[in-house]
Amino acid sequence: MFHVNLTAGTCQVTKHDGFLKNMCRNNLHNNFLKCTQSEDYYSQTKYERGFTEFSKLCQNDPTYYQGCEKGFQSSQQNSHNAVCDTYICQVASTSRVTDSKRLSIYGKDCNGDLDCSNNDYDESGPQCVAEQITVDLRTGAKVPINQVCNDLCDISSCEDEAVCNGFLYGMYCKHKRNKKEIYIRPGWICDDWPDCLDGVDEEACNVPAVEGTTCKRDILRAKGRLEDPIFNTTRCGADAKDRPYCKDYSDQTNCTDPAKVELRCFIKGHMTTLSRLVVCSDKEGLCDDDLHNNCYSTSQTCSVHKHKLCDEVKDCADGSDENNFICSMKTKG
């Protein structure tokens, strides 16, 4: 952790990553955060694989509010006391402080060893109970049942998000070398690198650019193609969280699976659906009126879209989206 000399007015409570945090800045123009319940300060680093590390563990933070950020929702199942879907781990015998997502990614959850020095949730948490029930995926991979279709790629291939509600995201084919069946996630289709024996993952990719049915990709091009088609199997896939098919996230519109739909709005003058992965994401260029970012902080620990306020469904662990003062002013019909 870096040391700073704080003076009055260097910290301000503001919305950061969807939650109210004490944001600070020193005379060297370093940005950092102040713990909610203590006089400690910390910096944080986000990694592409989806986890966050911190320079210091906040004390007197039993609900691990330090770990609340976009991508995590306020949880209604607080079996490990975390107000969001992650707790903070001080990795045993090290100075590393990380959120629990890293433990899951690197196989440290439920492995029989206590990996955290500040709690035992990596072995006693609800995820360990769920991990006792596994599901066999089509390629033979096994995953805990609670990791199937949870909008997170819990294994590197993202096959745990391949078939949800009867809809296929990505594709299956035989590997070009060993001829075994493999899963191709949406972000690997039309990427100019054939993975399938028959090259089917790179078929039908050369099409004229048409607004709404093709998009630009954020990938290294081998053949110079400007746009790729958006297939039904690449729309609203969960891997968009860390590997979006379209650079502008237009693949997260017009979802085939109604269970993926979070919002309807006008996009370039046409009414369409929007997946929950991009609602309250601060991404620009989706809804014409930016409706997808019209979100409301109902408490220090929860932020929801205005359409989820007072709908008689608890989206916040503390129920603040249903108990908020706005609900008391709602017109009764």
Image (cartoon, helix red, strand yellow):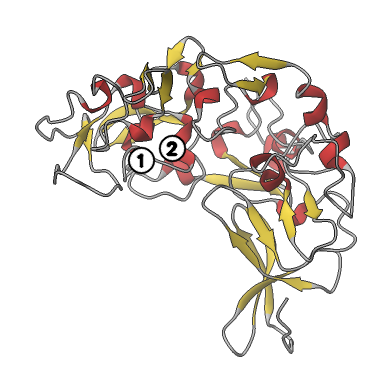
Q: Closer to the camera, 290 or 147?
A: 147
Where residue 172 sits, quadrant-wise, is top left
Q: Amino acid at mark 1?
A: Tyr
At 84% from the left edge and 34% from the top edge, which residue is drawn?
A: 125
Relative side of 62 to 249, left or right: right
Instruction: Work out which quarter of the rendered image holds the N terminus and state it.
Output: bottom right
Which label sits in the foreground, 1 or 2? 2
Q: Is residue 312 visible?
A: no
Q: Is residue 322 visible?
A: yes
Q: Is the Cβ of the residue at disc 1 closer than 8 Å to that at disc 2? A: yes
Instruction: Work out which quarter of the rendered image holds the C terminus and state it.
Output: top right
Element marked by disc 1: loop
Where residue 306 sits, quadrant-wise, is top right
- Hey, which residue is sitting farthest front in the picture? 178
Per the image, the residue denoted by label 2 is 240
At 68% from the left edge and 32% from the top edge, which residue is drawn?
A: 315
Image height of 319 relative to 117, above or below: above
- Hey, which residue is sitting farthest left in the picture? 208
Per the image, the residue denoted by label 1 is 249
At 55% from the left edge and 30% from the top edge, which residue is drawn?
A: 151
Q: Amino acid at mark 2?
A: Ala
Relative side of 236 to 226, left or right: right
Label 1, label 2: how far apart the Cα atoms are: 8 Å
